Amino acid sequence: MKAWRFYAFGDMRLDDIELGPCPPDHVLVEPMVVQPSVTEAQLAFGIPTLAYENIKSRLETDAPIQLFGHEFCARILEVGSEVSGYAPGDRVAARAKLPCGDCSMCNSERGTDCRTGPIIGFQLPGCFAERALLPAISLVKVDDRISDSEAATLQSLSDSIAGVETAQIRPGDSVAIFGQGSMGIESMQAARACGAGQLITVDVRDEACQLSLELGADRAINARKDDPVEAIRALTGGEGTDVVFECAGGSVKQGLAGDQALKQAMHAVRSGGKLVGVSWFGAPLQLDVDLLRERSLRYLFPDISSQAHLEYTVQLVATGRISMKPTIRHILEGIDKVPEAFEITANKGKYQAINPAQVVLAQ
C-alpha cells in the first residue's frame, strides 16, 4: 500500500510499504477523509510545539517512519478475532490518546491521565495512508447523519468538549473565547451546548468573527480594531467573564498570537474566574503569577478526551447542536495532496483556513 513517511522535518515521501495482518484486538480500515491537526502540521515542518523533542529523536533514530493522522473518518474493512461491536462497512473515527491499561492512573479508573499509553499518529501509525490498523478500543462509530468530512473533525472537537468540561461551565456563565480558529470555534459551540450564557468571541479576522456569530456567539470582537479587554469588560458590567478560553496563542510566524492573547485573557476574566489554556506555545513563557494570585484566578488546562467525550461529540454533531461544516474550507482530493494539506494547516492565517485542510482518500 501507499503511505506517507517522514525522513526528516519537512521531508515527507509517499512510499510503498507492507502492512501486516490484522491483530486480534484491531481493525483494518480504509481512511476516507483525513486532516493534519495544527500540532501535527507544525511538527511536520520542525516548529517547536507539543512532542517536538520526541518526534525529533524518533526522526534521528528511526526514519523513515509513519507519523501523524489521528483526525480522520475511515471505513472498516476487516475486524480482528477478538473485536466485537464493529463490522466491515462501519464508518469510524477515533480518539488519539489511548490508556496503557497497566499504570496507577489506569488501575484507578483515571485512564485519561495515563502518560504511557500510545497515541495514534505518534507511537502508532495513523491514517495518512491507503490502509491503517487501529486498536478497536480507540474507535467510535460515525452516525449516518454526519458526513465523512465532518467526521474527520470529531477527534479535535472531542478535545474541545473535554476542555469545556474542565471549565465546569454552569448554566448562564458568561464565556469569552480568544481565537476563532478550529479549537476556538469548537470551544465556543461546546460552551453554548453546555449551557453558557453570554458568549463573546475574539479574533483578528473579520471573517472569523462573522463565522462565530453565525454559529452562536452573542458578540464578536475584532482585536485589530478594538481593545478586547475593554470591550469584554464593557459587555459584562466592568467585571469580565466568568470563564475565558485562550485558543489564539502560538508561533507568530504561523499567524498565531504569540503570548499576547494569553495576557489579554488574564485581564478579561473576572476576579475568581477561570482561564482555560488551550494553546500550545512551543517555548517557555513569562507569566504574571502575582496577577493570578491577586485576583484569585484559576488557570486550568483541558483534560485529554475520553471515549465518553468522543461518543458525546458524535451526538452533538449528529443532532445539529454543533456544526462543523462551515469551518471546513479546504478539501483536497487524492493521497498525493497530503503535503499541501500540511502546508495550509501550518499556515492557516495565510490561507484563511479555519479547520485544518482535509484530504479525501476514498469515497
Image (tube, rainbow, N blue to C red):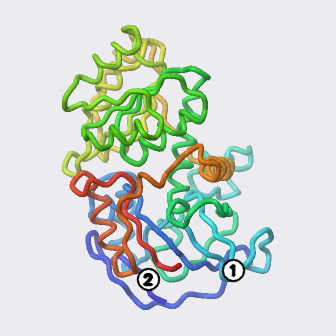
Outermost residue to the front? 214
Where is residue 358 drawn, in percent x and y?
41, 66
Q: Which of 329 and 302 is in front in this view?
A: 329
Q: Element under label 1?
A: loop
Q: In this view, does 62 lie to the left or right of 166?
A: left
- The residue shown at (19%, 28%) is 225
Q: Earlier in the sequence, mark 1 or mark 2?
A: 2
Check disc 2 and report the residue beneath it. 3
From what the image shows, is residue 286 above or below residue 63? above
Q: Do the residues labelled 1 and 2 touch (CB within 8 Å)?
A: no
Task: Tell me where residue 48 appears, x and y as whole percent.
Answer: 29, 54
- Residue 27 seen in this snapshot: yes
Callout 1, which amino acid? Answer: Pro
Give x and y (percent) for residue 87: 75, 76
For residue 23, the mark is: 1
Measure the C-alpha gap from mark 1 to mark 2: 19 Å
In this rendering, would 334 be left or right of 313?
left
Q: Residue at image x 33%, y 68%?
A: 341
- SS at mark 2 in the image: strand
Residue at horizontal 55 percent and vertical 61 percent from the top? 151
